[in-house]
Structure formats: C-alpha cells, structure tokens
Amino acid sequence: MNLRFARHLLPCCILAAAGALPATGQSTGDPEMTPFAGNTDWQKDHEQRVKWFREARFGMFIHWGLYSAAGGFWPPDPQSGRRYDQQYAEWIRTWASVPEPEYGRTLKPLFQPDPGCTEAWAKLAKEAGMRYAVLTTKHHEGYTLFNSTADYSVNNPVTGSTNISPAGRDLFGEYVESFRKQGLVPGAYYSLIDWQYPDPSRYRSYLHHHLTELATHYGPIGILWADYSSAGNEGSHWGTRTILDTWRANQPTAIFNNRFWNGMENPNADFFTPEKYVPPAGYPGRIFEVCHTLNESFGFSYHDKKWKSPAEVIKLLSDIASKGGNLLLNVGPDAHGRIPEESVQTLRAVGKWLEVHGEAIYGTTGSPLRYPPFAGRITLSSDKDGHTLYCHLHEWPGGGLLSLDGLETACTSARLLGGGPVELQTSPNAATAVRLPAQPPDPSDPVPVVALKLAGPPVFDTAPYPRQAADGSVTLLASQAVIAASPTSPQPARLEESHIGFWSDLGDSVWFPFVVKKPFAVTESGEKVPGRYDVMIEDAIGPDSGGEIEVRLLDQILRHRLQPTAHWRDFRTTKIGTVTLSQAGLLTLHVRPLSITGIGLMNLRSIKLVPVSAGAGS
C-alpha cells in the first residue's frame, strides 16, 4: 500500500512478524470472546463504570519509550543518522532493522527524562480541556516505564533490564500521581506483543506478571488500554479472562478497550478503538474512542512536521462527539519528556475553545440527525434542565441564516456560545431557523456553536439524505456518498477518515443523493427561474497522479482535469463548473473517472453546490 494515497493506516500495533495490517472487522473463533460471557457482574455495572468516560469526550494519549530518543533516525542522530520517513517513529527498530542488544545499548543512555516532566504533561492536558490520559507503559519494543519485578525485566541476558526509569524513579508512578493531582483520570497502555522477549512458551506468564503489577501497585487506574491482537492471537491466546479477572478484583471501576481481540471494531469489552479514522455514522448503543495524532507519528519524530492546526483538532473533536465517541489525542514527548512546542501551542488553543464551547462537547450524546441541514455537526445534551441541541458550525451559514430544516420539536430559545446577537425564527409552516450576523462575530473561532433550547426531546422527520441549507447551498461529504466499486478492482475506492481514497480503478464511481426543496432563483418581479449553482470540489492528489473526472447531475455533465497538490493530505477547493436546477425533490450527483494518472485519481473530501444567481435556494 502506498502511504501517500488516502488514509495513512499503519496502526501503532502491527504484528511485527507478519508486517500485516490489522483487520477492522470482528474477532473470530476464539473461546474467550468477551469478559461478559458467564459473568453478569461485568454487564451489571458496565453503565456505572463507563459513565465518566462517556462524559469526558477528550483525553491525552502519550507514546514514550526508548524510540523517543531515536526520533525517526538511525543511528539516532538527526544530523548524521539515516532518516526513516515511515509515519510511526515508535517503529524505528523495525524500520531500521536494529537487533538487540544494539537497540537498547544505543538508546538507553540517550533516554534521560527531566525531573517533573509528567507534571508538565498533566498541566498541559488540563489546560487543553482533556479529562483523562493513557500512557504507554510498554510498547512493542518491550521496555517498561514501570519498575517491574519480573525476572526478565530486572535482569536478562539480552538487554540487561527492560526497566528504563532513571535510578530512584518510577516513570509510570510519576505519571499517575501527576495526572491525579490535576483531577484527570490516568490510564495504562500495554502492548501485548513484545519484540525482545525470547521465549514464547513463557511469555504469557511474563505478560500476566506485568499486568498484575499495573493493577496492584499504583492505586486506581481508569483504563487498561491493550494493544494488539490478530486472528489466532487473541482472547485465550493471552489468557485474557484471567487478566481481566485480576483487574476486576483490584481495579473494580476500571474500563477496558477491545484490543485483547482482533479487529478495531470488534464488540468485546467496554469500548472499541478506531485508529486515525472516524466511523462515518458512529455506532448507536456502542461506545468508541478514536485514537489520533497531532502530526502523523505516535512516537516523537524530528522530521514529522505535518502538524494539525487547532481548527483541525477542534473540528475532529466536534465530529467525533457528534457521533457519540471520544477523542484520545496523542502527544509524543522526546527523550527528555518534553512535548514538542507545536503540540503545546495547538493543545492550549483547543483548551481556550473548550473554555467557551465545552458544554457542546462534555457530557453530550451524538447527533439525533445523521445529516445536519448545514455545514457542521450536532450534539445533544439532555438532563434535568431539559434538552439542548448544539449546532457546531464548521462553516458560517450564508447570509447568517441557520436552518434546522426537519426539526419537528419546538425551540424555546437560541444563543451563540461566547456571545453575539441571535434571533430565533419560527412559524407553523416553516423550518426553525436562527438569524445570526452575516459574518462571524469572532473570525478567529474555528467552530462557532449555536445552542438551541428545545421544548422536549428532539424529533426530526425521517428523510435519510443530506438537505439543502438555508442559504441554498448543498454540501455533500464523502461520508454521505454511495460508493459503487468495480467488481474487478483488487483494491476498490473506499471511505478513509473524511475522504474517499484508494481510487485507482476506472470502474469505481460515487453517487451523492440529496434533497433540494427550493432550487429556484427569484427575480425582482417575483418570477421563479431555474437556479444556477457553482459546483465546488474539495480534493487532494499526490505528485504525478490525478486524471479526468465526469460529474453528472440530471442531464448536465461537467468534465474536469484534476491537478496534483503537494501531497495526498493537501486538500484544496476548486470550482469545476456551473449547473442549473429547476426541480425540487431527491436528486443524485454522480462522479466517475474518465482517466487515471499515476497511482490514484484523488482523495475526495466533499462536493458543494453554491448558488450564484440572486435568490437561488431562498
């Protein structure tokens, strides 16, 4: 797979021997499928144990280990070492094919955590508006941030010791204490695979020793975050039931992710764990947590500068919360425990946004409407004070008119979080609408939020398609497309994160159904004439790739030659032509390739119809 094309999927947990990507489906054929089997206590207190997690919505993932000292180079020197451009710097031992004991002997002297570094992490997490954290107690390289008493960890002939805390310190213990002091819930990541332990027949006992120490030596731990299983190496292979019974006895309030079993979306344990992608529609009735990164790598990298902006992180958090999930956002401290300044500045900006808009994230549930009638997301708060619908505006609505077309529950009030004039407009025969200023009162706010107080639980009509917005525009997201894949394609186009990628077959095409209620333009004399709409495409294309596409709407055809951007994540918006609409109802826009250059056509994020004639869609 070419990592420049579509979603960069190498997970932080590929089985080293196989070098294969994990499946995203369900676990299969294992006798220890779930800790709930035969144990009603797990089911009985599940909702009680996950209550805080459902409300938290935002946590800090911390990847830290000997790999942090290499920073994506081997030998570990950014001036003279070879640079490894693979995304995940925590895999440097694999990328550079470094054996033990060379790996440990080289990196241990360079791993020198500053005193108080975990205090700085916890303060930053608090400032960012995070409610919990998960630290890598042992990653695949096999080194431990806690002081294990297991024989192999204390003294072994391969690496000397797996414990890498400085003398007199226990880094995991420092982390737990620091985060508790800030009122944040500490969690423990533990890799089920180990690249250095030499005896497979004894590995399960070693694994259990470690996980028992974590359960019994550090006080309350909120999450046990296991990583990684594969088909045939899951559940009973690890002795999962025994592990979880031990944790159940010693950490009765802890929750557990699903990676003791194969597949990121398998239904076992308390929550499932999509990695670097957001489930398009969420999973009603299930809890999930998206783990994502501030750049591309989980571990510290000197050369990975593809930093997400505060706006990108806020929109990601908004998107995930609207689907009922949590965001576990990764930082990769360096060998001294210092979080890169780019990460620090972004997290502080996200925290400032949450100070104003946090009520639209924390404690909310997912959107009751799959396709909002505006460019943005919806979350819902229901409590003793009633029901509040939060409209997250990823784009400011044209003319300042925010329509809630399809909402059948009456609204009693509306407010813009952070202030600004708002006028609620309702009538018996018209959609609820909110009149906002024509321009955002605060241009620096990446996601303004309008809170609507409802007279009762939200009820929407059941039309399952994207709708025309109040300004007449139509926004069609990749997650809303129907992908018609070629039956002969070995790797058909598919949804990846927020875009359609892996588009390399001429037989692949996509369809976007949508509803238009007012396609016409209205002249000064009041005459209705067909409305004209610019067609805007948002795409990204890697070097030496692209092609030509055909966009068809009713009997109108547009053709457009695609040009490369800087890379597969460098999205841009381009006008490809204009169409005319004269009929209301359910319409469908079709996109198909006429030619493909290089390794792929494009990553397609969205298509938007923007009215260009006066009064179109109004």
Image (cartoon, rainbow, N blue to C red):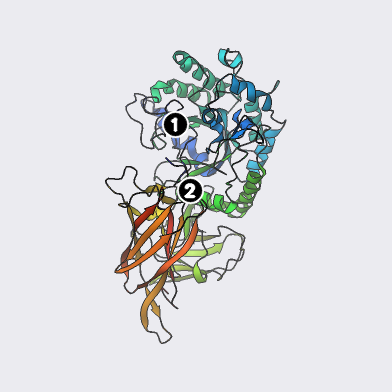
Residue 559, position as x, y percentages in the image: 37, 64
Percent x, y for residue 470? 44, 69
- List the residue tagged with mark 2: 320
Of callouts 2 and 1, the N-terminal one: 1
Q: Is residue 101 above or below residue 430?
A: above
- Residue lying furthest right: 115
Number of other residues with Cα within 10 Å of mark 2, as a class: few under 14, some 14 to 19, many 20 or more: many
Q: Regarding mark 2 in the picture, which secondary structure is present there?
A: helix
Q: Residue 431, relative to residue 229: is it above or below?
A: below
Q: Amino acid at mark 1?
A: Arg
**Residue 420: mark in rendering:** none
> Is residue 368 in sight in this rendering?
no
The residue closer to the viewer here, 542 or 394, is 542
Asked whether 403 or 501 is in front, the reply is 501
The quarter of the picture where the N terminus appears is top left
**Mark 2 belongs to which amino acid?**
Ile
Badge 1 element: loop
The residue that appears at 44% across and 13% down in the rendered structure is 201
Spot occupied by residue 588 in the image (x, y as percentages of width and height): 32, 62
Question: Is residue 16 depicted above or below 531 in this figure?
Answer: above
Q: In the rendered structure, are the residues bearing label 2 and label 1 in contact, judged by CB atoms less than 8 Å apart?
A: no
Image side of residue 334 versus residue 323, left or right: right
The residue that label 1 is drawn on is 259
| Neighbourhood count class around disc 1 (C-alpha, 10 Å): few under 14, some 14–19, many 20 upward | many
Does the image show residue 559? yes
Q: CA distance from mark 2 to mark 1?
A: 20 Å
